[in-house]
Image (tube, rainbow, N blue to C red):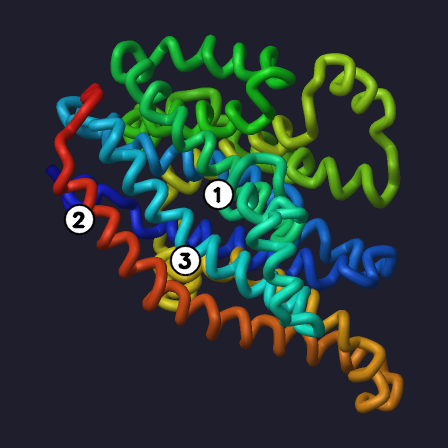
Amino acid sequence: MNKEIGNNRLDYLDAMRGIAAMMVLVGHYINWKFKDNPVNQALSYIFNANDAVSFFFVLSGFVLSWAYFQNISKPLAINKYYVNRIFRLHPGFIVALLICLLYYNRHQLNFDRFTTLFVYNKEIFWEEFLMFRGFNNIFLPGWTLSVELNMSFMMPFIIVIGRYNKQVLYPLLIASVLASYIVGFFFFHFVLGALIAANYDFIIGNDFKKSFLYKNRIPILIASLILFSIRTNDRIFGTYDNIKYILNYLRIDFFVITGISSGVFLLYTLHFKSVQRILQTTILQFYGRISYGVYLTHWVFVIAFYDKWDMLLTKFNGNKTSLFIFGIFAVLLLTTLTATLLYYFVEKPFMKMGKKIADSIKARWVI
């Protein structure tokens, strides 16, 4: 058993998650107030906040299944698995939700307001607190986390299908697209991630160099980069009316297309060690570790900055460019500090707690 399998993780993938989180942060920042600015429109192709979540989901599908495909005899107790996932996702989310709640209600922190929120639940706080899908009135990025949690509940069954016969994952992938109107667009992403995980040994091996994917890697990567930006291109230029008509008719979202691109990016990262060495640099590894916190906490800092935009602009003598540049560094610094604290004082302790609880309960529904 090699070191990677023994640790049940591929460290360089953390950096990819960190890069995606930074794409979201910068993308939200530059498009919050100035999305029609030509420079920001160009930057949106690099900092594609909307479709970075496609990569998050494909990567999650891979990471959650990889160890079980590498060690086919590794038991998966569904109840233990669920406990670990809840303790991984929920504590950080609750902190981010409460931070946003306090910020939005900073001018009315009184008994009546809290009664309305927590007792009468008139703004469906508790549904959002419990990550019910579709309830994201306070912390808007939380919709992706509710998807992540819901799809996590499906992953053991995707894994058992792949363990039984990984070839079955191919028709399941097609079925996930055809049934996307019923099961949601993002089931596809998790199945795709699991499919890549099931073929990991082939992808990293020499036989991959004989495949169509390797021999045509340059045009495939170029096409994937273009398709990954299809939503951004449509927002700016609106040139995909015919494609959107067909996709809408089939009840397929652009997220499926960007999910395919994300799968391509992941696949080539797994194969090329030169890319992995770059991803293992200290700064990228650091942001990989705190990536969940970056995704969770950047939102309130972006909101707060633009809420104060007009006031801050007077201090910068009306120089919007200087304020804009100052703002991105301020948001990045505050997000990094908060995400680091969140990682060490919330995420890690609760992950350990979740593992301890999972280890203490009897394994049920073992597959």
Q: CA distance from mark 2 to mark 1?
A: 22 Å
Q: Is residue 278 visible?
A: no
Residue closest to the eye, 100 or 198: 100
Q: Secondary structure at mark 2?
A: helix
Above or below residue 343? Residue 12 is above
- Quote the CA–CA distance across marks 1 and 3: 26 Å
208 above or below 85?
above
In the drawing, does residue 101 fall left or right of residue 362? right
What label sits on residue 130 in the rendered view? Answer: 1
Is residue 266 found left or right of 35 in the rendered image?
left
Q: Residue at x 31, y 35 (%)?
A: 82
- Residue at the image point whose x is 76% and y is 60% from the top: 32
Locate residue 232 relative to residue 221 in the image: left or right. right
| Residue lying at 21% horizontally and 27% vertically, measured from the top left | 76
- Residue type for callout 2: Lys
Percent from the top left, x then y, of residue 323?
77, 80
Q: Is residue 317 visible?
A: yes
Residue at x-position 23% and y-position 53%: 353
Which residue is the site of mark 3?
A: 288
